[in-house]
Image (cartoon, rainbow, N blue to C red):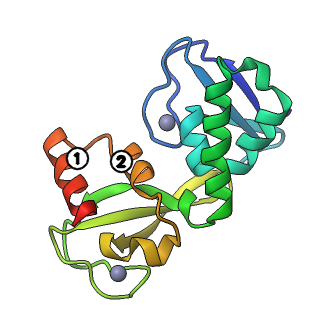
Amino acid sequence: MPHLFEPAPTGRAKCRGCGRPIRLGELRFGECIPNPFAEGETTLWFHPTCAAFKRPEPLLAALELAPEQLESASDRESLRFTAGRSLAHRRLPRIDGAERAPSSQAKCRHCRQPIARGTWRIRLVYFEEGRFSPGGCVHLACRKAYFEADDVWARVLHFSQDLSVADQEALAGAFEA
Ligand SMILES: [Zn+2]
Ligand SMILES: [Zn+2]
């Protein structure tokens, strides 16, 4: 089966990209992959924006095949642009949000120095065999050097929706500092 877009027939499925539910009737993106555990194929469901951030190749392929299913041309252009950035900078799809380090145990994947407890770090994930696996963290200050891109903020915020409003504001301040 090709990748596809369709309105979600229930509100029960969770997005593989952000872990949040996809609402009933909301447009969802399905990435069709060989089933890693059995014969046949399986479909991974995403919010289209989450797929543009984390799974750019299949999303772009689906945009080519079924663009008329998207509500408006602006949606399509914005998804295409975001996915294009994800493809152009191969580390950007690894962004999985930000958090304050719960301990000083982890080392930054860029500079190899410890990330101090209580300071902000960006979580990384890798997509392998049909699932996202945790891949460590980087210092907020190492983001430009690691991701080799300037447009990191929107992605980090998108995958940090579990933070309180106050924490999101603190994170925004840390980005500007
Ligand atoms: Zn999502
Ligand atoms: Zn670092």
| Position of the N terminus by quadrant | top right
| Residue placed most toward the observer, 42 or 46 | 46
1 or 2: tag closer to the N-terminus: 2
User: Is residue 160 left or right of 170 when viewed as pictured?
Assistant: right
Which of the numbered marks, if any, corresponds to residue 157? 2
Image coords of residue 77 (percent x, y)? 66, 35
Tell me if mark 1 has few (under 14), some (14-19) or many (20+) residues whose alpha carbon lies within 10 angstroms of its own.
some
* CA–CA distance in space, label 1 to label 2: 8 Å
Disc 2 within 8 angstroms of ligand 1 (CB): no
User: Is residue 173 left or right of 61 when viewed as pictured?
Assistant: left
Q: Which residue is mark 1?
A: 168
**Residue found at x 38% / y 73%:** 138
**Residue found at x 39% / y 62%:** 123
Image coords of residue 41 (percent x, y)? 80, 38
**Residue found at x 52% / y 13%:** 24
Q: Are marks 1 and 2 in contact (CB under 8 Å)?
A: yes
Residue 26 higher or lower than 80, as above or below: above
Which of the numbered marks, if any, corresponds to residue 114? none
User: Is residue 93 left or right of 101 when viewed as pictured?
Assistant: right
| Residue placed most toward the observer, 120 or 75 | 75
Badge 1 marks a residue whose secondary structure is: helix
Q: Residue 35: in sight, yes or no? A: no
Question: Amino acid under label 1?
Answer: Gln
